[in-house]
Amino acid sequence: MKYRVSHTSKYIYSESVSRCHNEVRMTPLNNRNQSVEKTKTKIFPMPQKTFERIDYFGNKVIGFDIHREHKKLTVTVISEVQTLPPAKPSAEFEKMPWNQVRDMMHSSSNSLDILAKEYLLASPLVPLEDEIQTYAALSFPEGRPIFEALQDLTKRIYKDFKYEPGFTTISTPLAELMQHRKGVCQDFAHLEIACVRSMNLPAAYVSGYLETDPPPGKVKLVGSDASHAWLTVYIPGFGWQDLDPTNNQQPNERYVTVAVGRDYADVTPLKGVIYGGGAHKLEVKVDVAPMAMAHQEGA
């Protein structure tokens, strides 16, 4: 699939901001499942200074400074992305027991396996706790094939936890999520990452977008898509396997990956430091449209 993705983040401040320093992680990645053909970033007010870099996790970062007073900040990133179906594991990998994968990770001297080992560790938003390990272990009996175990864990989170926007924030602890069994995609991604890591398997957080369908008989509204979150698990010899516990499925060509990290704190779309501003309101609008549709609409 080929998509035109537009993501706008708009901050409205109650008081003037005299200056700000920001970083943007809203440009899709190039990886084995997608390629970015075009991308453009629009910032208002116009910055006095901008720079680009690739961060530690391989994400594209656009930094900018604004040194004039403003009460609104708008950042829009528009990209054209070609996505591909995910790679399918061979029969050999499908039958490989998860505990064999675990042991391979710890004994391997392969450079890619060694790099993935940091995703075995706890991170700021993904602590490793006994309650989560107990929950995870039900999907990982000894000898169970790795892909079957991961699919079972994904399905259980989907069934056991209710999607309820506004019930949690990005700082809600996983212990509270386990107690109330309610949250959103970021929570469910963090939970499954914690489960996988508690079984000594590497897992990373993925931010991106998912093309959504309108209700039956309705026209898709501009801005009706949203940022999404899922996870990816590293399997030696195969690579990274994406999982979406919010929708109980493996991400496919309708998903667009933007950034990867240990947890949400590594992939925040827009963050920085401001001087002044008072209270603020954030408005986010995301559109994910197949290119044929985007051209028809004059995008």
Image: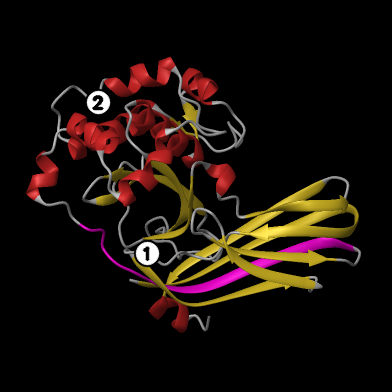
In the rendered image, is residue 112 in sight?
A: yes
Say which of 168 and 39 sits in front.
Answer: 39
How far from the left and from the top, in percent, is residue 281?
76, 49
Task: Tell me where the magenta segment starts and ends, as one range.
Answer: 70-87
Judging from the image, the colouring scheme is secondary structure
Residue 144 is situated, as x and y percent measured from the top left of the image, at: 15, 29
For residue 8, above or below residue 96: below
Residue that badge 2 annotates? 139
At 29% across and 31% down in the image, what residue appears? 153
Give the camera-side residue of 30 and 176. Answer: 30
Identify residue type, mark 1: Asn
Q: Position of residue 227 (x, y in %)?
A: 52, 53
Q: Is 108 positioned to the left or the right of 51 in the image? A: left
The residue at the point 35 percent across, 32 percent down is 196
Which sits earlier in the primary sequence, circle 2 or circle 1?
1
Q: In the rendered image, which quarter is residue 114 located in?
A: top left
Q: Nearer the viewer, mark 2 or mark 1?
A: 1
Q: Residues within 10 Å of mark 1 (few under 14, many from 20)?
A: few
